[in-house]
Image (tube, rainbow, N blue to C red):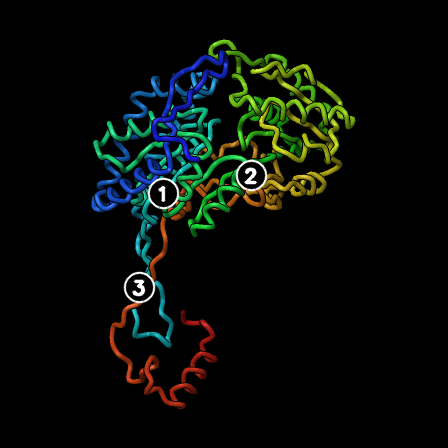
Amino acid sequence: MAPSKNATFDSHNPVTNEVIASHEIYSEAAVKAAVDRARTASQEWRDLGFRGRRKVLLKWSSDLLANIDSLTELVSLETGKPVSDAKLEAALAAGHIAWAARHAESVMRTSHRSPGLLMANMSATVERSPVGVVGVIGPWNYPVFTPLGSIAYALAAGNTVVFKPSEYTPGVGQYLAQSFLDSCMLADIFTCITGLGETGKFLCESGIDKLAFTGSTRTAKLVAATCASHMTPVVLECGGKDPVIVAHDADIKRAADATVWSAFSNAGQTCIGAERVYVDERVADKFIEKVLEIARDIHPGAPGSGKYGPTTMPKQIPIIQSHIDDAIARGAKVLMGGSDSVKAPFVEPVILCDVPEDSIAMTEETFGPTIAINRVKNMAQAIELTNASRYGLGAAVWSKHRGKHIASQLHTGMVAINSVISFAAVDSVPFGGVKDSGYGRIHGPEGILEFTYPRTVVRARFQLPIAFTSFSRTPSNDRLIVRVTKLLKGRLS
């Protein structure tokens, strides 16, 4: 039985577990009403045109930056992450809003296509149209950056958006929607609905025209199945088990420093953060030594006292614990921390070495401040082990001379060479994965096109003496069509 529209749930500070606020659990009827209002508002948003929407979105981006302190304090309160990390996240997200606003028109420009000699009397074009109402289900680990990667691009393409934030960060979701309304005074263009898992299910079933989901692979499969029963297309950005490959010619100091940050920042709660490292055995000892030197000064704590914060979602704690314990039980060498590093809600840094490839610490997403470092004989072995994973989101490659060659062989959606997660900060490139890491893309031109559909328009500029699309077509007409097709074989298309 669906909860009534007056039912509520509490958001909590993950450091103290104190209640921050109570939020409405949107019922099925309330979700449907929000989607209906968004659909009614769609025409107003489309009628603004590209220039009008650009003006609105650029102002919203500027307003978010002008009030970044209030936003990031709320992010820190709901997630427990340092305010500095929240500020970086919000700034990058504002940049994506501006990029989408400035480039939507050129990306969606009508494309003129060659009709080919056989259809030379035709004008052929492909238009891009917004899909309509886009539903977005966002995560709690990056409650500003990640959902805005869908929201901003969907809005720029001319869609309206109904956003269901994580139940762990509902206040951030409401802040984003209210900031948009305050910025432009256009109601129902970008709406936030709050609730638990069932509210997300209601959104999938509400008649939206497309859904963008970020979360675990397990939940993504349920979301995709629900949407499929309504023929609703989806964009899925799921988990990862992102590798770092360190070649013998890598800048070891930089590679170690970046890898430690990638693995432990945001308490390891980053889908594109480093979880496993494959380092050439010739430089492995040097790399490990440097990693340990840097990691000794990294400790968790409440905002203002730790390098990173708590595990935001309490049920993730036993998962992190099981991954550590399984690796150790299977013979992994503990270089730093260990089983007793889990001190809920915090987890101290854990560094393991020589971890069996079939342990869950190597096969499943840990989503905690742990990292496994394994030696490899050569880059071929590193590539093979990287690609053996069922995940394929991001990767990092460290090599002064072979970075591009190694990157080109990885079965991942994104690769950073001599850097980490840099692809997330480049507005113009698509973000997304393959295999169990999901499908579809956000960011860049692909992120705009993801929330559109192509419309083909073919117009007769003049009439041919032979009518191919007529019951008056003769056998000689058929022979002519076949002869011309054999001759051309697509050459003049």
Please, what is the three-letter code of the amino acid marked with disc 2?
A: Thr
In the drawing, does residue 289 fall left or right of residue 207? right
Q: Earlier in the sequence, mark 2 or mark 3?
A: 2
Q: Mark 2 highlights which residue?
A: 217
Q: Mark 1 highlights which residue?
A: 134
Q: Position of residue 414 (x, y in %)?
A: 53, 40
Q: Indicate whether 476 appears above or below 137.
A: below
Whole-number angstrom distance, CA of label 2 to CA of label 3: 38 Å
**Residue 247 position by quadrant:** top right
Crowding around mark 1 (Cα neighbors within 10 Å: few <14, some 14 to 19, many 20+) is many
Whole-number angstrom distance, CA of label 3 to CA of label 1: 25 Å
**Residue 96 position by quadrant:** top left
Q: Nearer the viewer, mark 2 or mark 3?
A: 2
Label number found at residue 39: none
Q: Nearer the viewer, mark 3 or mark 1?
A: 1
Q: What residue is shown at x 37% (from left), y 43% (from top)?
A: 206
